[in-house]
Amino acid sequence: MSSHKHHEHLEVIRNSIHTTSDLDESQKSESIKRIEEWVLEDRAFGTLKNELLKISLYFEEVFSELGIK
């Protein structure tokens, strides 16, 4: 997947985190923290996906909407 596509997906995921009522404030904060760490460390997208799924299964729905398996 291209870097541009990752950036688009990250923006959708960030917006989803900020607007959902399915995550509590702690889960939102931890999710944003993981995304920021991922961007800084330039890790594989699959690693970020797994990290977010550990926080909440809510992200299964987000990834599904983005077509990410």
Image: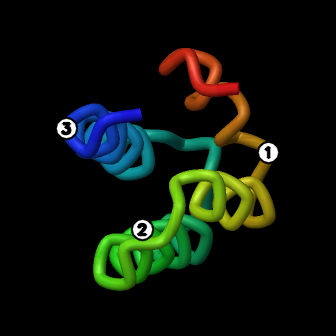
Query: Which numbered disc covers residue 57?
Result: 1
Q: Secondary structure at mark 3?
A: helix
Image: 6 above or below 33: above
Considering only order in the chain, which callout, 1 or 2, is on the residue closer to the N terminus? Answer: 2
Marks 2/1: CA–CA distance: 16 Å
Query: Which label lies toward us, 2 or 1?
Result: 2
Judge by depth and name the residue closer to the eye, 25 or 51: 51
Say which label, 3 or 1, has the lower sequence index.
3
Q: Nearer the viewer, mark 3 or mark 1?
A: 3
Describe residue 16's horizontal placement relative to residue 50 as left or right. Answer: left
Quadrant (top left, top right, bottom left, bottom right) of the N terminus = top left
Q: Nearer the viewer, residue 69 or 17?
A: 69
Question: What's the residue at 19%, 38% (across, down)?
Answer: 4
Q: Which mark is residue 4?
A: 3
Q: Quadrant of the C terminus?
A: top right
Asked if marks 2 and 3 touch (Cβ < 8 Å), the reply is: no
Q: Residues within 10 Å of mark 2 (few under 14, many from 20)?
A: some
- Residue 47 location in percent, x, y? 64, 63
Which residue occupies the extreme front position in the image?
2
In space, the residues marked 2 and 3 are separated at their CA atoms by 16 Å
Q: Amino acid at mark 3?
A: His
Residue at the spot x=79%, y=45% of the render? 57
**Left or right: where does residue 27 sit relative to residue 69?**
left
